[in-house]
Image (spheres, grey):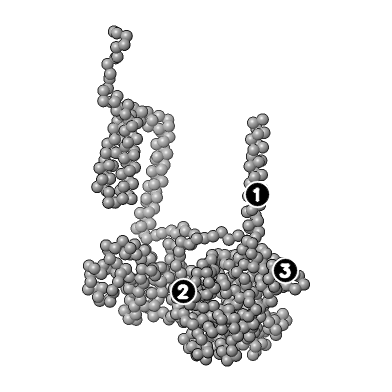
Amino acid sequence: MAVNERPPSGGGIADRLRGWSLLLAALGGIGALGGLLLVVWVPELRPFAIPTLIAAGVLLALAAAGSMGYLLGAVTGRRGRLSWVSLGSAAAALAIVVLLNVISSATHASWDLTATRQFEIAPQTVQALAALPADVDVTGFVVTTDEDGLHYQGTAEGYLRQFARHAGDRLSYRFVDPELEPATAREFGVVSAPLLLFSAVATGLRASVGAGELSEQQLLTAILTVTGAQQHTIYFLTGHGERSISDLRSGGSGLGLAAAGLRADGYRVESLMLADTASVPDDASLLVIAAPRQSIPDAEEQAIIRWLANGGRALLMLDTSSETRDVMADLLAAWGLETVPGTLVDRERSAAGDPRTLAVQRDQYLGQTAVTEGGAIVEPLGTTLFPGAVAFRPAGQIASRIERGDPVPVRFEPLVTTSGDSWAVEGTGENPAADRDVPGPHTAHLIVQASALAADAPSEAFDPASVRTTLTVLGDADFAGNRHFGDVSNADFFLNTVNWLLDDRALIAVRPKQEVFRPLVLTVPEYNLVRYVSWFLLPALVAAAGVVVWWRRR
């Protein structure tokens, strides 16, 4: 045989495939990935994506055929067997997940693991649905060729499916395409879609929820409306420099956003000019007096006191201005209250860098009171910010009688208190003066119930069976203003207070659950802890670890 003569090649095509297998595998992988991306993200190119996936499959099959020996060795070897164990474990876990989803779908069970439970209806909604007094029919009108309409239908069905499960046979729903069934749309008087139309034969009432209003709270409000639930009317006093409910500026001090939140809770919200009416309207369920800056004439003030003394309910909000304190002094005194001189400064529980902005945390809520059994107002809340607040305390003869243990006609139930390192500081400074300022803890929010006017019958005993007046008194109006209404739990704190005042416990925590930015609010001690840990502790741990490694290697 000649020296440079090559031996005859064996295998032919198999050898060629073996040499090209890596390239074929790479091309097949790229084709498969690209085809899948086209199928998922570019539906209009699916006719091109399918042949691409087929070609990629052929290339991968050829690559596998050319590397069959290597693949068999990898599969049957020790590492291969371990890989099969891992793949088997993963397949078993996937099978369990699929089985749980099948069971969950068949039984309509679900678990909401989000922080705000945004995909789960509230327990109060469940209770309201279980106690429906009349049958409710829901007809959804959605154009099936409209992408936004289909998204609306999917969201609505998610809510209605849960509603129907808890309402039993009291609630039924269906969806109609008004373009395919125009007679049905004309029957209900529907001229636009998407839309949910609620109706109850027993009451003859109807309500609708449009595309921009779809939420658990709006759906529940519509159901309660058509079954004949009473709609409360809330009046905001105006004409004396109060915060305006028509001010919708995002950075303003008005209460426009708070009023919108109340309307979303199903209330009718109006302004009240007592100079025109001379008395609180008969349909008033609640009166809100939000930090007036100008004096209230005596006739109007007496009209308010008379209305409250005859079973009225009110939400009184102050601010740190001396004008508001002076204007509200007589109203507070009628029920044995006064403000503590100065502005609250809390060096332990406040926003970092601003001790005048109270950061009220969960352990500062006194929810378990004799009035709010179970903490109805504050139990669902996180941190609430009060950017400048005043404190309250019993006044005059009422304070003296409480100190002696004598009966009084009022009951005070604090809901928010400051920490032990807090003061009511007079002036604009932040450092308290022991000889002038009043140390805490202080009450910044409280509930007042009275069976008689404290000013008229200070020695009368409180009778819980004949409560005639219910007030919530807040030391800050800015927390509910447009600028701060969306901060942390401020909106829920305000709305929960109103819900409680109007005995609408079912609405507490039933308002829309949105995917909101959840900032980390740190008090001064917490901020210092984070700062010192990052400055000193972490570098010290790294240095200690370095010393240990050096010692072992030495």
In the rendering, at what x and y percent does residue 419 appear? Answer: 66, 67
* Nearest to the observer: residue 507 or residue 151: 151
Distance from Cα at disc 2 to Cα at disc 3: 39 Å
Which residue occupies 52% across, 91% down? 278
Instruction: State which tag comes first along the sequence, 3 or 1.
Output: 3
In the picture of the structure, the residue carrying the numbered disc 1 is 535
Distance from Cα at disc 2 to Cα at disc 1: 45 Å
Q: Vertical placement of 195 versus 236: above or below?
A: above
Q: Residues within 10 Å of mark 3 (few under 14, many from 20)?
A: some
Label 1: state its secondary structure.
helix
In the picture of the structure, the residue carrying the numbered disc 3 is 432
Q: Amino acid at mark 2?
A: Ala
Label 3: state its secondary structure.
loop
Q: Amino acid at mark 3?
A: Pro
| Quadrant position of residue 417 | bottom right
Question: Is mark 2 in CB contact (under 8 Å) with mark 1?
Answer: no
In the rendering, at what x and y percent does residue 189 appear? Answer: 28, 76
In the rendering, at what x and y percent does residue 271 appear? Answer: 49, 82
Which residue occupies 46% across, 57% down? 113
Label 2: state its secondary structure.
helix
> If the image is split into quadrants, where does the C terminus sit?
top right
Q: Vertical placement of 272 versus 480: above or below?
A: below
| Quadrant position of residue 339 | bottom right
Instruction: State which tag comes first along the sequence, 2 or 3.
Output: 2
| Quadrant position of residue 353 | bottom right
Disc on res. 260 = 2
Of all residues, the one furthest to the top in this rendering is 1
Q: Amino acid at mark 1?
A: Trp
Q: Residues within 10 Å of mark 2 (few under 14, many from 20)?
A: some
In this picture, residue 421 sits left or right of residue 318: right
